[in-house]
Amino acid sequence: MDANRNDSDFPVLGIDDYFQFPLPEQSDDGLVAVGGNLSPGMLRSAYLQGIFPWFNEEDPILWWSPDPRFVLFPEELHVPKSLRRVLNQNVFEFSMDKAFKEVILFCAAAERSGQKGTWIRPDMIEAYTKLHECGLAHSVEAYLDGKLAGGFYGVLIGSVFFGESMFTHVENASKAAFCIFVEAFRKAGGKLIDSQIYTDHIARFGGRNISRAAFLRYEKDYLEEPLLGEVNL
């Protein structure tokens, strides 16, 4: 990809089409490519190569593969005692793919400390909604008294879940949904959850940094391993 090349020069790819990105190993700062588009095939190709889009409103599309990579191995999930009590009380009801559009819109509107605006722009919402319609992007929801209280969305390929963003309207809602999902994902044969870059939030659940080289090795193996069954929350 070339920053001087017009984005319209790149083909709109269907979900089964493949685009070869520059090798992540050749990037020193994690930025792999500039430009392109957010068509389903382009997005799927990026995830297959350990790359994801992340850019601000004034930027062209930026494609990243950071080093180190922040991940959670499902078997290493740590549930804090306070949250375990919430889960034991069955405060929330959980679902998967019941309200994808609502989840991504709430994620876009969520306020984040130290950030102005959001990287989940209308074009990203449209792109991931299409990816959801193709069966690759998924949402997890937590409900309280029948109302959506929190949740998150990401991309699932093989036995790897690539987390994108989460929101919460009720304390502990998204945390509880995440823990329930990780346990169900592990039971279904899930091997790796990608959180992209370090966050205190996921670190509390057992997330840790690994080298980009290690991440790409894990990904190569796990993308080829389908889940044993459905993720039942």
Image (spheres, helix red, strand yellow):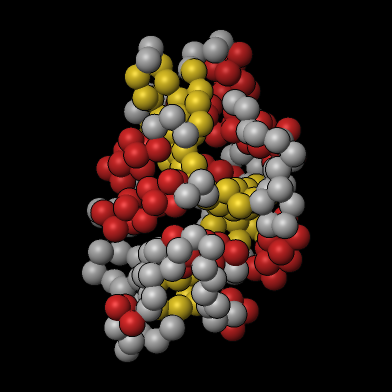
Give percent across and percent down for residue 136: 52, 49
Q: Which residue is drawn at 27% across and 42% down?
A: 109
x 66%, y 51%: residue: 158
Closer to the camera in the image, 163 or 100: 100
What quarter of the picture does the N terminus occupy?
bottom left
Residue 61 drawn above or below residue 134: below
- Residue 59: percent from the left, percent from the top? 29, 71
Residue at horizontal 49%, vertical 13%?
A: 91
Which quadrant holds residue 48? bottom right
Residue 139 shows in the view:
yes
Residue 207 or 104: which is nearer the viewer? Answer: 104
Q: Is residue 155 left or right of residue 60?
A: right
Q: In which quarter of the image is the C terminus?
A: top right
Left or right for 87, reference 166: right
Q: Number of callouts in the render? A: 0
Asked whether residue 172 is in view, the answer is: no
- Give the camera-side residue of 17 and 48: 17
Q: In this view, does 149 lie to the left or right of 90?
A: left
Q: Residue 25 falls in which quadrant of the image?
A: bottom right
Residue 122 shown left or right of residue 172 in the figure: left
At which x and y percent is residue 184? 66, 31
Identify whether 4 is placed above or below 113.
Answer: below
